[in-house]
Image (cartoon, rainbow, N blue to C red):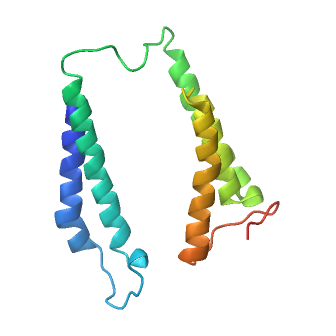
Amino acid sequence: MQLQLGIGAILAALFLILYAIPNWVSSPSNVRNIVLSPLFWPYILGGLTGLVGLGLLLTGRQRIGGGAPVNEPIDDPRQGMLRLAAMAVLMVASFRVMPWLGLVWTSMLAFVALAFLVRTRHPAAAVVCAVVVPLILYAFFAHVASVAIPQGELVRLP
């Protein structure tokens, strides 16, 4: 399965980089900052898709010889449906809370809730990432790229 996903991701990345982005994404010639160019982030996403596909290929080749499954099979298939329903509730709650808390704080809480919903093996890393990643993204987009990030009614970031 990983080999097929890896090949699919690499083909998707090649399609994006060689055909879709050059033909369907237009960019003005007077963009001063490369990061703000409409071409920059699609190329980054295409490259990252290719890297993920390459990683899937490499890990898939190592697993061909056999090995234990990554996750243990569950006895009760209803647990999967319960998690899916909890994910839907989490998404709806995130969008309901976002105007009050703001995008940054809501994404922190949603990340932590999702990490514990899927029972991560690394809860400390999940909590650290839940706090650090939204703050770094906020700092970049608000202060470097000058993009307005939705702030909440309760707490406002500088």
In the foreground, 66 or 94: 66
Q: Is residue 83 left or right of residue 150?
A: left
**Residue 129 as seen in the image, left or right of residue 158:** left
**Residue at point 61%, 67% (across, down):** 139
Residue 136: give x, y in percent of width and height. Answer: 58, 60
Q: Residue furthest bottom?
A: 30
Q: Residue furthest right?
A: 154
Left or right of 59 on screen, residue 77 = right
Q: Is residue 144 above or below residue 47?
A: below
Query: How far across and how far down the image is residue 25, in percent?
Result: 29, 74
Number of numbered markers: 0
Query: For residue 101, what is the image quadrant?
Result: bottom right
**Front residue of this view, candidates 20 and 156:** 156
In the image, is residue 131 above or below residue 34? Answer: above
Q: Is residue 55 left or right of residue 147?
A: left
Q: Which residue is rendered at x = 32% and y = 73% of the image?
A: 39
In terms of depth relative to the viewer, which is nearer, 36 or 100?
Answer: 36
Q: Quadrant of the N terminus?
A: top left
Asked if residue 88 shows in the view, the reply is no
Instruction: Say if residue 135 shows up in the picture.
Output: yes
- On the image, the x and y values in percent for residue 42 come to 33, 65
Q: Quadrant of residue 45?
A: bottom left
Q: Position of residue 144 (x, y in %)?
A: 55, 75
Q: Residue at point 28% right, 49% down?
A: 51
Q: Which quadrant, please, contains the C terminus?
A: bottom right
The residue lying at 48 percent from left, 14 percent from top is 77
Q: Is residue 88 above or below residue 104?
A: above
